[in-house]
Image: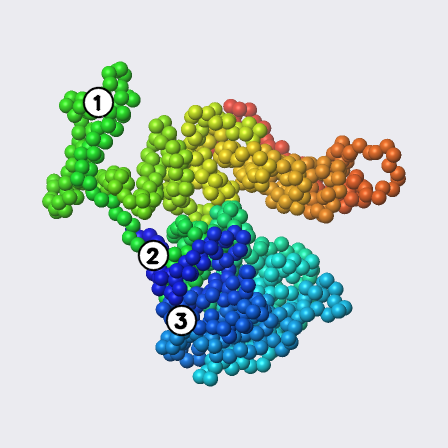
Amino acid sequence: MTRLALEQVTDFGDFTKGKDLKEFFKRAYSNISSQNCLSDVRLSPDGRHIHVIVRQPKSGLMTYDKYQRAHPMQSQKHIDLVLTRNVPIVDVIYIPQSKPDDAASVLGVIFENGKAEFWKFLECGSGWHLLQTVDLCNSPRAKVVSVSVCQNFIIWCEERPPSENSNSVCSNFRFCICKKTVEVNEGGVSLGNVKIALHNNPRYTTISSGDLVYLLPDMRENSSLGFSKVFIVWSPERDTFKVHSACSCTLMKSSSKESDFKRLVTDLIGLLSTLNPPDICGFSPTGCGDLLLLLSTGWVCIMKRDGCLRNIYKLPDNCLSASGTQNSLNIYNEILALTIGRTLFLIDTKCGLELERISLKTEGLLFVNSLDSHSPQMLLETGMFVVTQRQKPSPTHSEDSSALLVEAVFEEACKYYQQRSLSSTQLTVEKLKKGGMFQAPISLAAILRDYLSNQKTKTGEKHSSGQERLMSSLESELRSLVLLEDIKTSMVKASEKDLENYCETLVQQEICRLLGGELERENLQYLNSIFQLFPTYSWSAMQAVLHLRCNGEGSLSSKAPAELWKIILSPVQPTANFAHCNGQQKHTTVNLPVFELLCHSIFKFQPSWLPRFLELAQQQMGTTRSYGVKESSESLPLYKRALTVLPCKETYQHLEVELLLCSERPKAIMQALRILIEQSQWERVTQVAERFCRKSPILNKEIFDALLCEVSQHRDLDPYLDLLWTLCPEDMTVTSILNIVLKNLPDSTQNSGPFEAQGSQVTIGLLKPLLRKVLQRETKPSHRYADILQSPTIPPLTPPRQPKGLFRDAEHQETKPRTSS
């Protein structure tokens, strides 16, 4: 088996002033929580140059190269431009070469005041040389806030000084998007004229990907009009703009040759008020026109160049908040690499499968090396690392494994026979070996010795046909048994580096073994201890054993066999191991069943999966009923068993509601509806009502009665009355409606006037559409039983009556000629 691992490819000692760089990164990483230092680190496309933008105490640029050369950027001239004037640096960019054979790198340093310096790195020379200094902006008062390179264009977002008559709203739209053509030639860098592509726009961050430029809003500036909810995709060559949102995969608007931002989004103002997209926590261009997005919901998505937003992977819940804001992500061929804090995730982009999760000692920065774009590369405090495929350490076969396994067979046999023995005499291994009373452990020990001897010698010795059939039938069990024992032996001798891999493999093997047969009391206790001692490994093993997959829509799928689900979903009695009373879980000394163990693990690592797992378990319950898994009247239903893992806190009431709704049971649905009503989540209440009223007439009546009581007491449901009236059951009458309303009217205040400023009671005007609808239904003649109630005008003829005996004789006479013929 192979696994993905980090291997160091470059030490900082290979760079100029590598020791200073290492010390600088130590200082930067120690203050990472307060100064987001990694956001100011840039690497060249070939990974040979590291640039660190210094913000405090004075602005500057620290550049480290892979070759042992002098550092010309620390010359007196550059110090005068950067340090003495203390002009902040916006960003550094690498200009693409017109000649691909030219290995010299041209670096552009963009300053906040619109100045730009272009430097060239010469291998045969002394390092960096200043080519020229130019002005990007036409206005000396302009201010550059972001910059990028897209093909042969330099793109930047420029802030114009506010006018004297501008108000606070207009001050948010004093930015513009500009572009200039750029070309590297022998004489230096030649720039074209400035062209304003978009003006009167808010502050944007420019990100280039292929031939497109993404304009992402600055989350620090929240516009009252909601323009931070959308971002723009711009093609510099065609000057076309497309407006997108992170909560929708559909194109909101497309426009060409439109240079005014206000005109571009004027007809979207009404739509923006209804949008509530997640925040963008991280992004990275893919180089082919797509953009990777890390959203505040935990989803990693890719925005395709055609406007389609595709979900790739869902991070564990609370992962972003627990790890801070530091993150980086990139796509390498078909592998998504993502760092959240000190954890590196490697994801298969085709199916969203987590390939590996690697713990880091410090935060890292992912980058794409143009010389090797298929391998994830990372900059860490100690150097540059690359993700490679490494063979998992195979367990070493011990010389004494045969004797240990044979001894384990007899020890297990002692436990087995002792439990079923009526005698109080203690069984020992020596008695089993010598007594000859129990042939099963002796035979199994002989089979193990024969199997292990063949494994050691690798001989192709042929056995009898009966022995061959026996060995072939036991091959898989023997292999897993020997592998498990070898892993245990190897863990004792393993180094600290390999111990974690052995432990993960061992936990998965043990969980798979325990769930492969009937779970007795000792095995269940052992399984509980594994989940308690190794929660992380147990969570990974559970996903592997059940083959759990989460698709882009959030639903779970499993490829586990029905026999495994039969063990997981085995029914438990309400007093078996815990009681759930008023949302509180009372543990006793008895161990948790398998289903509760899995629910606890899901709730700890991925709480949002718990309702989906309940749905999956209920589907499997229906599938495995032919295998004997039936829910009796005395056993707890699955949704109540899943509810026991929730602590008695209001924080997780949303999960409780989801579990109750997933059960599809009327009482649970009404309980969830009451919780939503108590929380005044009226939009969610109407959604639940509309969804479940169509499934059952009885449930429809209960839901409508509950909502009609709420309508009688307050006016919070006024925006949803049209929808509620459509849910009125067919057997409701005007009298029953008025009775419900009158019974639930709140007490009127004594000193209230005839006209209240803010009325809180229901009025006849609000009930009028409902009453009119029910009256029309009552007065309209019903044709449901018309064909039954209709009777013919002429009654049918009475059949001739005869005595019993005569009728039987006549029938007998009639059947005689038929038989004779």
Q: Which color scheme did the rendering employ for the protein?
A: rainbow
For label 2, the SS is strand
Residue 195 drawn at (x, y percent):
60, 78
- The residue drawn where x is 27% and y is 43% is 494
| Residue 532 position (above or below residue 374) | above
**Which residue is depicted at the point 46% across and 83% down?**
185
| Helix, strand or loop for disc 3 | loop
Task: Choose mark 2 or mark 3, whichever is in front.
Answer: 3
- Given contact means CB atoms under 8 Å apart, are the residues at marks 2 and 3 in contact? no
Give the residue pinned by disc 3.
70
Q: Which residue does the image show at 82% across and 34% down from the upper left?
A: 748
Upstream in the sequence, badge 2 or badge 3?
2
Q: Secondary structure at mark 1?
A: loop
- Residue 680, how many percent across, how many down? 67, 41
- Numbered label attached to residue 183: none
Q: Nearer the viewer, mark 1 or mark 3?
A: 3
Q: For residue 200, what is the image quadrant?
A: bottom right
Q: Amino acid at mark 3?
A: Ala
Is residue 643 shown to the viewer in this render?
no
Mark 1 sits on what residue? Answer: 428
* Sequence-wise first label, 1 or 3: 3
Against 569, residue 99 (above or below) is below
Q: Which residue is mark 2?
A: 7
Q: Position of residue 262 (x, y in %)?
A: 68, 68
The residues tagged by marks 1 and 2 sit, at their Cα atoms, a distance apart of 51 Å
